[in-house]
Image (cartoon, grey):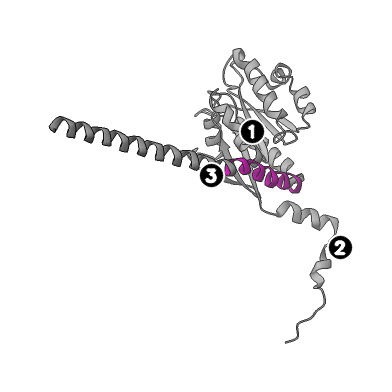
Amino acid sequence: MTISSQRPQSHNLEGRISPQCRLTLFFFLIRKVTLLVMGLDNTGKTSLITEIQRGEEPAVSKLRVDRFEVSLVDLSGGQRSRGTWRNHYGDAHGIIFVLDSSDVLRMEEAKRTLSRLLAHPRISGKPLLLLANKQDKVDALLPCELIECLSLEKLVNENKSLCRIEPSSATKSLHKSQSRTILQGLRWLLHTIAINYSVLSARVQQDSLDQKAPREQEAPRRATRAHSQTRGERFEKERESEEEWVGAVWEHG
């Protein structure tokens, strides 16, 4: 058998593939995508994830949609928990932000939260699917009203994030049209990610490394502090035991 020293012809294959074939190959590759599911507390995020996963338990965070392997990360929307959101920003290819369309009193809070989210350097420029949830409620704002209420056009333009808003209502008696809009929105988000997948993946890879670095640097310091504390506690216990022993000897003496 002769081993050729020439460069394999397959290296030049790309030039022979027509643009149509390259486009076909591009859209038929399996892509791994991480989506953060966010929003204020009590917006119905968990119910929507269950609907997206077609009845799977919310704890099952992975699903297959078309040619995508999707990891859904459900982040708690409580005020105290929002401070931890930034720990996940670097892993995200895109964002699903869930709104309670009927909670008009908290709309300003939702606007501030969304504004801070989109302005973060690890989120800015990533595509956003906004689900206007609880459309079954009588007092729910329509998507067109929410766009104005949130100054959504201004927000996404300032942060260069492509955005789509879809009505939703993840109730047990969910109408098929509502279920369809959720899936349409998800497919739009994944298609948008696919178009810029190489750029987003490179960004995710770098951001994930940048996020891990401070935690890895902090780990030895935490271990040292814990060791020092343990050693100090051991010394304190030995000192107390010694004092007790001396006291006992003194009493018996």
Q: Position of residue 230 (x, y in %)?
A: 40, 39
Mark on residue 238? none
**Residue 3, picture quadrant:** bottom right
Residue 56 makes an appearance in the image: no
Task: Of the two numbered discs 3 and 1 on the same chain, state the one appearing first in sequence.
Answer: 1
For label 2, the crowd category at 10 Å Cα-Cα, with few meaning under 14, some 14 to 19 and many 20 or more, is few
Mark on residue 96? 1
For label 3, the crowd category at 10 Å Cα-Cα, with few meaning under 14, some 14 to 19 and many 20 or more, is few
**Marks 3,1: beta carbons within 8 A:** no
Query: What residue is drawn where x is 57% and y is 45%?
Result: 63
Query: What residue is drawn where x is 23% and y is 33%?
Result: 244
Q: Position of residue 67 (x, y in %)?
A: 66, 50
Q: Amino acid at mark 1?
A: Ile
**Marks 2,1: beta carbons within 8 A:** no
Between 38 and 241, the one nearer to me in the picture? 241
Range drawn in magenta: 198-216
| Inter-mark Cα distance, 2 to 3 | 51 Å
Q: Against 159, is 70 above or below?
A: below
| Inter-mark Cα distance, 3 to 1 | 35 Å
168 left or right of 148 in image? left
Query: What residue is drawn where x is 66% and y is 35%?
Result: 95
Q: Against 201, is 42 above or below?
A: above
> In this figure, which residue is indicated by the disc labeled 2?
15
171 left or right of 238 in image? right
**Residue 167, picture quadrant:** top right
> In this figure, which residue is indicated by the disc labeled 3?
220
Q: Secondary structure at mark 1?
A: strand
Q: Amino acid at mark 2?
A: Gly
Counting labels gives 3
Q: Is residue 63 magenta?
A: no
